[in-house]
Image (cartoon, helix red, strand yellow):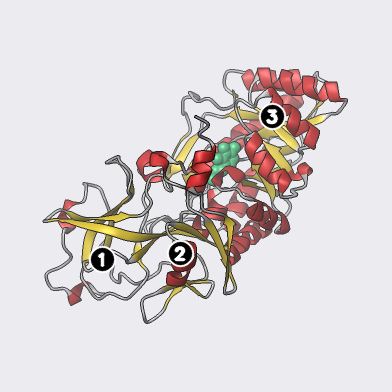
């Protein structure tokens, strides 16, 4: 609907925090293709369909809340990354969202997989992921996790500390194998969304610092150990990044260390991994680059730096997580209550909340939301979508416009919830975690079922 349809203008438009750029939408029914997965569409009846399926039917069959995952969209994203990085390796960062179906899809599309715990490794292995295509991350892998990863034959372990070098080397030696490793280095670059800091304090738990010589010392130690094969260096600089300027600085510093290693040891390491963190559109204000653009820039940067240092160009890896699965899913909720605060905003309570999406409470993340079960010509009202938890910070969408006639029983959907929502879901208030329903070509199937109270009680042995 256009604003002129409502001469009085939208309600509550004047209470947004300063610096907030939320626009009153021209048309509450429009689906921004940056934010909604590829097969979503809205009919004249106002109902959202995904993969040809009516969300009212999905809600009926699978209940709400539910994560609805658009398999065709996800596979297309995998292919885009794989094609863009032909000649490089794409590791899907499993922590964004992992289940067996997803492991099979990414494997079929030619991606490799990052895991960072024994649990993620177990999911990957049980889905039949080829172990040589798995990379194992983490700043405090247990000895048991390390042993299990080596026994499984994981392709690479990203070592994060001196202790871990010793642990991996010892476990590999005991087993009479040579384990491939990369060293996670911190390069003093911190990137987030539109800014990056090239001189960030390396005040973080991950990695070995380049500037204080610890990364070079880690390399020295690894090269002396017969049970480790050093493939290269790994750097991960942030999350929800929209341009490659931070990667440029990081690549320069990583390549400088490769050159220093060559000078000291006479070896040119064959690989570098520049990590993940590529941004997605949570709202229409976000403008991510295409994988092809990112690939071209990163490849050029690495080539240029290597030529300048007279190094053979190493094989490049990247590790997108959010950029692969984030835009492929939306969360479907049912509205339970609404509370209008005159002159302020309308609170819309849904049947989930911070237990299925902690990102708003945790990072002040921004989302958008839409009425998806019917058409409405009502005026837009500044709204806040909140959950059902006993916590006033239980906010799913802080600020968004919804139609004034929104009512209990309506379905609303929050797009771009494929990453870091189900994977970070909790049982706060003993709420059961929602299912993940994969949709494709007019068919829906549960890939992660809804938790039941029986599941909750099974853990309670009192
Ligand atoms: C979290 C993480 C990623 C993925 O980050 P996204 O923001 O989901 O792309 C990749 N690599 C490492 C080492 C990570 O910790």
Is the residue marked by circle 3 packed among few (<14), some (14-19), or many (20+) residues within 10 Å? some
Quadrant of residue 209 within the rendered picture:
top right
Residue 73 visible in the shown view: yes
Ligand 1 image-quadrant field: top right
Q: What kind of element bears circle 2? A: loop
**Relative depth, front residue between 78 and 218:** 78
Q: Is residue 68 left or right of residue 379?
A: right
Q: Is residue 168 left or right of residue 409?
A: right
Residue 169 drawn at (x, y percent): 77, 22
Residue 4 drawn at (x, y percent): 18, 75
Give above or below for 84 relative to 270: below
Q: Is mark 3 within 8 Å of ligand 1?
A: no
Q: Distance from label 3 to label 1 (Cα)? A: 49 Å
**Relative depth, front residue between 166 and 294:** 166
Q: Is residue 417 left or right of residue 367?
A: right
Q: What kind of element bears circle 1? A: loop
Is the residue marked by circle 2 packed among few (<14), some (14-19), or many (20+) residues within 10 Å? many
In the image, farthest residue toward the bottom: 44
Give above or below for 462 relative to 129: above
The label shown at residue 420 is none
In the rendered image, which residue does mark 3 sit on? 145
The label shown at residue 407 is 1
Give the mark nearer the N terminus: 3 vs 1.
Answer: 3
**Residue at the image position 69 percent from the left and 52 percent from the top:** 111
Give the mark nearer the N terminus: 2 vs 1.
Answer: 2
Count of marks, rendered view:
3
Residue 411 drawn at (x, y percent): 36, 65
Residue 265 drawn at (x, y percent): 78, 22
**Residue at the image position 32 percent from the left and 66 percent from the top:** 410
Quadrant of residue 132 within the rendered picture:
top right
């Amino acid at each position: 609907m256009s604003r002129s349809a409502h001469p009085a203008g939208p309600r509550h438009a004047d209470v947004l925090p300063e610096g907030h750029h939320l626009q009153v939408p021209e048309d509450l029914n429009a689906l921004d293709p940056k934010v909604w997965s590829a097969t979503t569409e809205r009919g004249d009846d106002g109902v959202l369909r995904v993969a040809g399926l009516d969300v009212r039917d999905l809600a009926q069959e699978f209940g709400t809340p539910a994560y609805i995952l658009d398999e065709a969209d996800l596979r297309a994203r995998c292919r885009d990354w794989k094609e863009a990085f032909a000649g490089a390796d794409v590791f899907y960062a499993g922590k964004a969202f992992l289940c067996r179906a997803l492991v099979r899809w990414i494997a079929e599309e030619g991606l490799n997989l990052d895991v960072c715990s024994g649990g993620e490794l177990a999911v990957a292995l049980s889905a039949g992921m080829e172990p040589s295509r798995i990379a194992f991350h983490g700043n405090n892998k247990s000895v048991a996790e390390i042993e299990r990863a080596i026994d499984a034959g994981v392709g690479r372990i990203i070592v994060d500390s001196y202790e871990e070098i010793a642990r991996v080397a010892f476990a590999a030696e005991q087993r009479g194998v040579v384990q491939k490793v990369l060293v996670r280095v911190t390069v003093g670059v911190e990137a987030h969304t539109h800014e990056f800091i090239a001189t960030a304090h390396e005040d973080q738990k991950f990695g070995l610092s380049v500037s204080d010589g610890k990364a070079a010392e880690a390399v020295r130690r690894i090269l002396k150990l017969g049970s480790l094969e050093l493939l290269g260096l790994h750097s991960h600089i942030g999350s929800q990044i929209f341009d490659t300027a931070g990667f440029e600085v990081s690549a320069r510093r990583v390549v400088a260390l490769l050159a220093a290693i060559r000078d000291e040891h006479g070896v040119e390491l064959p690989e570098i991994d520049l990590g993940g963190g590529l941004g997605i559109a949570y709202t229409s204000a976000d403008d991510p680059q295409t994988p092809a653009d990112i690939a071209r820039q990163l490849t050029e940067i690495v080539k240029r730096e290597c030529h300048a240092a007279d190094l053979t160009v190493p094989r490049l890896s990247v590790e997108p997580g959010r950029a692969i699965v984030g835009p492929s899913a939306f969360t479907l909720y049912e509205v339970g209550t609404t509370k209008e605060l005159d002159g302020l905003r309308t609170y819309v309570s849904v049947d989930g909340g911070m237990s299925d999406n902690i990102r708003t409470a945790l990072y002040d993340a921004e989302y958008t939301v839409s009425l998806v079960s019917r058409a409405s010509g009502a005026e837009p009202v500044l709204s806040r979508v909140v959950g059902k938890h006993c916590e006033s910070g239980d906010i799913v969408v802080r600020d968004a416009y919804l139609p004034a006639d929104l009512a209990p029983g309506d379905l609303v959907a929050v797009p771009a919830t494929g990453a870091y929502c189900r994977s970070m879901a909790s049982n706060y208030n003993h709420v059961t975690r929602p299912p993940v329903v994969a949709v494709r070509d007019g068919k829906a199937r549960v890939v992660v079922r809804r938790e039941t109270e029986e599941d909750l009680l099974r853990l309670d042995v009192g």
